[in-house]
Image (tube, rainbow, N blue to C red):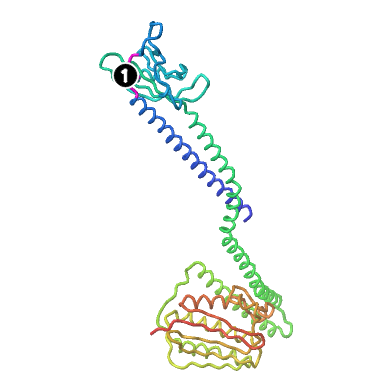
Amino acid sequence: MFSAARWRLTLVFTAVLIVILLTSGVVVYLTTRSVMFNRVDSDLEDRAHRDAPMLSREPPPSDDGTGGDHDFIPREYTTGGYFYARLNSGGQVTSSSPNVDSAALATGDALAQALKGGETFASTKSSQGDSLRVYVFQPDDPHGDAGIVEVGRSTEPEEAALSQLRIILVAVLAVSVAPVLVGGYLLSGRALRPIKSAMDSQRAFIADASHELRTPVAVVRTNAELLKRHVGSAAAGKAERDSLALDDILSESDRLGRMVDQLLTLAQVDAGENALAVADVSFGELVTDVSRSMRPLATARSIDFQVEVTGEFYVRGDREVLRELIVILLDNAFKYVDPRARVELSLKKSAKRVELTVSDTGPGIPADAIPHIFDRFYRVDKARSRESGGSGLGLAIARHIAQAHGGAIRLESMEGKGTTVTVELPASG
């Protein structure tokens, strides 16, 4: 799926850049061509008006005295390939430079426009097929019909330069395709990486949630089927077995309910919909209340539970959400320590922050597991977690609660020596 999407993005990226390069190349080529030929036209126009008096005078008689010399224009005027010609109103050449090519002279519309007192430029071809540019105009002559003057030159140097420019632009475009493909492939991979990571996380989330929900659902179903078979039965001990089945159903239903609540909380967090009812909360009083309500859990497992809260501590936050944070930390401590272990809860104020610490003398957490301990569904001992009812969502929710209140949570642990979880929240007042 992502491989196909990556190649599609690569091809789109490559196509866009090729279009940009092609468009830029066309613009560069046309602009260069326009500038070059504008310079040619400006040069021809300046030269024609500068040399107009020479072009308008009568040619000297030929050696045999029979008429004018059409090649009367001095050769220095033709240096650089320029040629000159004067035509009468009928379009016949009356005088010209020695290098004039009759096939290169402008005719037709260009002559008609010049005869009307205008001026124009024309692109022509020599008899050898060379490209030429010609300026056609009618000079001022107060004594009579001045005819038409044409001044032109070859544009082969410009055409050669434009040909080289075309080759360079095509080469640049061709050479750019491979780097663009590679760059597009790398960039598309980087762009898709967060999406792929999110999709992988979502798949893992769904797989883990399905796995976690399957066990309590199976227990509920099994016990429900057992009760159904016992309905109307007169077997001895029926009431006791039914009572145990109902206890299992209620227990697993509670577990399902807690898990669904946790999943809903995380879904709201991901959607940004988990709004807090913020108010000043007596955090010390809240910690004391939660500790008192959860002490029976510690007593049932013979855990030495010690609470140390000194002074009044206030924080800005949602009281019920903060209660859930404390419950998660204590519930984890009670679940994952051995009987007769010690769990300590302390609350103190440091500078402008309130620090809640829950430590235990349990088995501790391996060093390689600590970086993942706040990940969703992550459990150090999966078999033991399922047995004790853990889903691997509690610490992920605890981290969200701490961060939502502008605080932070950290965990320190050593195998065989226990675990300490510390929550820091901004103090109020």
Which residue sits furthest right? 235
Image quarter where the N terminus lies is: bottom right
* Total marks in image: 1
> Left or right: where does residue 146 sit relative to residue 345?
left
The magenta segment is: 51-58
**Which residue is located at x 58 percent, y 86 percent?**
420
Give the percent coordinates (x, y) of residue 24. 48, 42
Residue receiving disc 1: 116
Magenta region includes residue 165: no
- Of 185 and 111, the residue lying toward us: 111
Q: Is residue 163 above or below residue 129?
A: below
Q: Is residue 209 above or below residue 29?
A: below
Give the percent coordinates (x, y) of residue 131. 49, 25
Q: Amino acid at mark 1?
A: Lys
The crowding category of the residue bearing disc 1, from other C-alpha atoms within 10 Å (few below 14, some 14 to 19, many at least 20), is: few
- Of 327 and 154, the residue lying toward us: 154
Which residue sits furthest left? 142
Image quarter where the C terminus lies is: bottom left
- Of 353 and 404, the residue lying toward us: 353
Residue 90 visible in the displayed image: yes
Residue 1 visible in the displayed image: no
Q: Quadrant of residue 217?
A: bottom right
Q: Secondary structure at mark 1?
A: loop
